[in-house]
Image: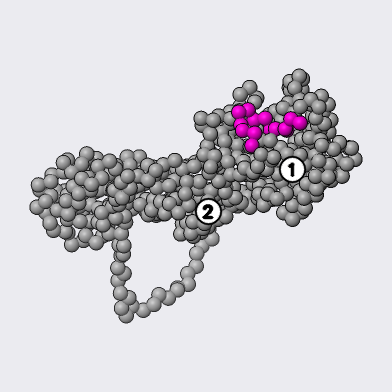
Amino acid sequence: MVPINLAIHAMLDQYTELRAGGLYWVTADQLTDARHLAQQFLQAMPEDVSASLISCVDPVESIISTMDPQRGPHTLRLFEMAAPQVSRGLADLTRDLGRARVKNASQILLLAPTQGWAKLETAKDFARWCEGLRQWLRVHNATLLIISHGESLLLHERLLPLDETLSGLSHLSRHKDDICYRLFFWHNDRGVSAGQEFKLADKDNVLTLIPEASLDARTPVADDQYVYLADRAVLEDTPAPSRHWRLFPNLASLCEAATNAQAATVIVAMDNNLPLVELAQHLLDVREHCGPALKIVVREMEPAVRYRDDELLLVSGANLVVPYGTPLSRFLNMLESVQGQRWQFTRHPDLASLLERQRPPHVRGLVSAHQFVTTVRQVYSQSSDVTHQLIRFEPVPGLSDELILSQMQLRRYGDFACLFGGHLFVFLFACRDDGLQPALANIFRLPWRDMFSGLQRLDGPQALPEEALIQATALPQYASHALSDTTIPLRPAGNRPPLAPQPMTLPIAEPHHDVS
């Protein structure tokens, strides 16, 4: 007897053959892929096989009309379930198979949407349904292949533990133009296969293995690959998209949970309060602990005022960096692009220096001209490939230095300034060109154009009057105004009596003035 096969072209039989009496299940993201696989399966059957097609998605005629009439079983029994009756029909499937007098040793193909099993509300009900179906198939020596399509996260959560009930479970997904075929487990007369991934192509509506681009067949497919571990902030106060999402209040709790994951998707929120070096170190720790199957996505939640080195995040473990301003719906779609990915980077040969070049000097606020120029020299010599901003401001005539400094707040380490020769020099560590204006808006309480008649960006320390700056070592007495923790002292109340309310009467109409 010729073995029954999924007939994915060029794929080994040990991954595609079906055994008599088995219950096999393939989930597909798209109906098109489900239909193509169904047609291949039917066309590969020998002529003398007793076969039945049960369609819950399309009229059966639309499925068989494009098949090669010279291939497949000589007789194919056709059944349809109307859309409103799918859930009820699937729940009573074994009863209806008996009433339809399906022959022993038959090959049965069922095409159905994932939501067709919604009537089986609990995992226990679903497992009981699968076990009843398996027993019926064994008694009748029949084989059933279920190909379902649509959102399958909940369905997979219920199917994965049933490896003793199901004979096989696999999944078809698309990422852009690539088709990924994941084999979770597959029992047949050739043995047992599990934890495999393959890349397929759709050639003239025929699913075909691409051997030279196949994924690592020895890599196990983890049970948590459909789980999302996310910082609560990435969803912008919206509810979790599904029960497979677990939300965490902060990065520390998220990373702690991620260390127990294998192939889940970990989503980190990045804002300007989180130092890039600290984030990179967290990613590196999680990646080294969990391995390459874990998917790590970083979403920017604020405009990147400071320079964000995507290379650093990627070599530290991220699969994807989602830029600020990406709509939530688009962001959720982008998460699908990393499914099935394996982190391909190797550890950077000099990761320590890569981290160090993003570490700002431990200097901020107003400094002496001497410290300003020496620190700028040091920064440029150690991180020449990182974009910084070195700026000279021309104050508006009549504006005192003390007033300028009272309107300036340099909160971040690596942001410092000095007053020299009637100019204000400011250095901003790791600040991109497109982040300069947002940075200045954060630094100055008033719009900077109200206080300065001009701004000149300098190319580096060589554009500074270095020799003169080196000689100026003193700070003005009002230097503390430009530090991050500036406070305005209040006058002591002394013996001043408390304020007392005084009654007064307001007119309800304007007074009338006689102009005659």
Three-letter code for the amino acid on which mark 1 is drawn: Leu
Image spot of residue 18 (x, y percent): 71, 37
Q: Is residue 73 above or below residue 389?
A: above
- Residue 178 x/y as whole percent: 56, 32
Of 401 and 503, the residue lying toward us: 401
Q: Is residue 176 visible?
A: no
Q: Amino acid at mark 2?
A: Ala
Crowding at label 1, few (<14), some or many (≥20) Cα neighbours within 10 Å? Answer: many
Residue 13 in magenta stretch:
yes
Residue under the point 85% across and 40% down: 97
Image coordinates for residue 230, horizontal then vertical, percent: 52, 52
Which part of the image, by quadrant, shows the N terminus? top right
Q: Residues within 10 Å of mark 2 (few under 14, many from 20)?
A: many
Q: Main secondary structure of the magenta part?
A: loop
Q: Farthest residue toward the top? A: 70
- Which residue is located at x 81 percent, y 35 percent? 106
Q: Nearer the viewer, residue 429 or 166?
A: 166
The answer to which quarter of the image holds residue 209 is top right
Q: Nearer the viewer, mark 2 or mark 1?
A: 1
How many numbered marks appear? 2
- Give the mark nearer the N terminus: 2 vs 1: 1
- The residue that disc 2 covers is 261
Q: Is 66 on the left-hand or right-hand side of 393?
A: right
Element type at marker 2? loop
Residue 294 lies, with reference to residue 512, above or below; the image says above
Q: Is residue 13 visible?
A: yes
Is 343 in front, or is 436? Answer: 343
Mark 2 and mark 1: span between their CA atoms? 30 Å
Residue denoted by label 1: 23
Q: Which residues are magenta?
A: 1-14
